[in-house]
Image (cartoon, rainbow, N blue to C red):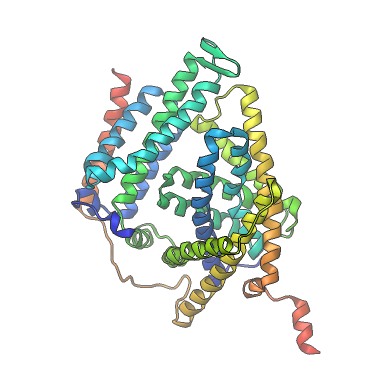
Amino acid sequence: MKKLKFTDLLITIMIGVVFGVLMKFWDDLYTVVKPIIPVARQLLYGMWFMVGPFAFLLLRKPGTAFIASIAGASLSAFAGHGIEVLMYGFAQGLAAELLFAAFRYKRYSIMIAGLAGIASCLASFGLDLIYGYAALETWALIVKYGLRAISAFIFTGIFAVYIVRALEATGVTSLIRPVDKKEYTLLDQ
Amino acid sequence: MFNWFTPKRKTWLFRVNPALKFIVFFAFLIITLVNQSLPFAISQAVLYGILFYVFSGYSLKKLSLLSIPLVISFLSTGLTMLLFGKGEAVLWQWGLFKISEESIQHALLLGSKSLSFGFVGFTFILTIQPVLFFYAMMQQFRLPSKYAYSFIAAFRLIPAVTEELQIRRNALKVRNIQFSKGVKGLYERLQSYTVPLFAQSIRRAQRIAVAMEAKQYQMGAARTYYYPTQYNTIDRVFLLVMICCLCSAFLLSVYR
C-alpha cells in the first residue's frame, strides 16, 4: 500500500484548508439562497461533501479523504461555524474513506467519487438524526435528503472529477502522484 | 483582522491547557448532540452562555456582534423544525406549514442545541492561541508532529489563499466573464475559482514540505518543542469546575 509521505500529508491538509476557505465564501451564497428557495439550498449543499473525495481523486492515496475532510472542517470551525462541524467533517470523511477503501483505493471514476459523496451524505444524515434535524414530516424528509444526495453526487462525482482533470492539465499533479512505470521506461529509451 | 481577536482581559480560561480545554469542550458537544431532553438542553445552553458572556474576557460590544450569527442559526434551525416538524397535536395549519406541540418542542430543542454549540465553540476559539493548541496536542495528547506541523503550516497560508481568491475574483470581474445559467454555470464558477487556487496552493504546500525535510524534519522522530506546554493547578480547577457545572445543569433540569 502506498503510504503518505510528509509532502502528501501537507498537501492533503492544505487542500482541506483551501476548501475551508472556499466553503466560507460558499456559505455566503448559501445563506442568501437559504430562506428564499429551500430547494436550491439543498442543491448547493453538495459542496460540503466535496473536500474528502476531491483530495482522494487528486492524491490517490489511502487516508487522504479522511484527513482532508477533518482539515476542512477544523478550518470551518475556526472560521466561526461552530465546533460541531468537526463532528460532521469526521463522519463525512470517514464514510468517503471507507467507500474508497471498499474499492481498494483503485477506482477514480465519476461513479465511485459520486458514491463517496452519497456515503458522506448518509453519514451526515445519521448525525442529523442524532442531533434532531431529521424529525420532519416524511415528505419533507425525503425531499430534503433526496435533493441533498443528488447534490452530493453532482459535486463530489461530476464536479470534483472534472476539476481534478483540469488540474492535471496544469501539470501540478506531477508533483504529487507517484511516478508511473511508463515514465521510467521513457527514461530508458 | 487578527487584531480584532485580542481580549479586553485575560480570564482564567486563557491559562488552561488548550488541548485539555479542547477535549473537555468536545465532550460537552457530544453530550449536547446526543441529548434529547428539552430541559437539559436549555440548562446546558444557559451554562455555556455564562461561560461565553462572562468568562471569555471580551468586551460586550464584540460579544454582542458575535451573538448575531448565533441568533440567526437559532432562528433558522428552529423555524424549519417549527413549520415542517412532525407531530400529532396540531395547533395551526396552512397548506404545507403545520405547527404542532411536538414541533414546538423540537424547535426549542434544536434551537438550544445550536446555541450551545455556538457558545462552546466561540468560547473555545476566543480563549486559545491556535499554535499553542497544536503544541499542546503534540505534548499532552501525543498527536503525531507531522499532523500538527502540517496544520500549523497550512493555517499560516490562509491569508495568502484568501488574497488569491480576491485577486481571482477581481480578474474575472475585469474581464467581464459571464457564466451560464443553472448547474452548468455553477460548475463554470467553481472551476474558474478553484483550479488556479488549488494549483497554486499545491505548489506552495509542496515547497514547504520539501523545505522542512531539507532542514531535517523527520516524521515520527523524537523531538523537543519550542513552546513547552504542561498541566498546572489551573487545569485541575478547570476540570473540576466544568464537571460541577455540567452536573448542576443536569440536576437543575431534572429537579425543577
Can residue B28 be seen at all in this image of the molecule? no
Direction right: furthest residue: A189
- x, y percent for residue B63: 28, 43
Query: Which residue sits at x=73%, y=54%?
Result: A103
Q: Residue furthest bottom?
A: A189
Asked if residue B83 is positioned above or below residue A152 in the image, the reply reads above
Viewer-proximal residue among A175 and B71: B71
Where does residue A186 sit, x and y in percent of width and height? 78, 84
Tell me: residue A113, above or below residue B89.
Answer: below
State the residue at coordinates (57%, 50%): A93
User: For residue A64, which quarter of the picture?
Assistant: bottom right
Please tell me which residue is depicted at 46% across the width and 51% down the height of the picture.
Answer: A76
Quadrant the C terminus of chain B occupies:
top left
Q: Is residue A105 above or below residue B84?
A: below
Judging depth in this view, the residue of B88 and A130 nearest the camera is: B88
At which x and y percent is residue B158?
A: 44, 63
On screen, residue B114 versus residue A58, left or right, reads left
Q: Nearer the viewer, residue B187 or B246?
A: B187
For the point 56% across and 73% down, which residue is it?
B203
Q: Whole-percent x and y of residue B183?
A: 69, 47
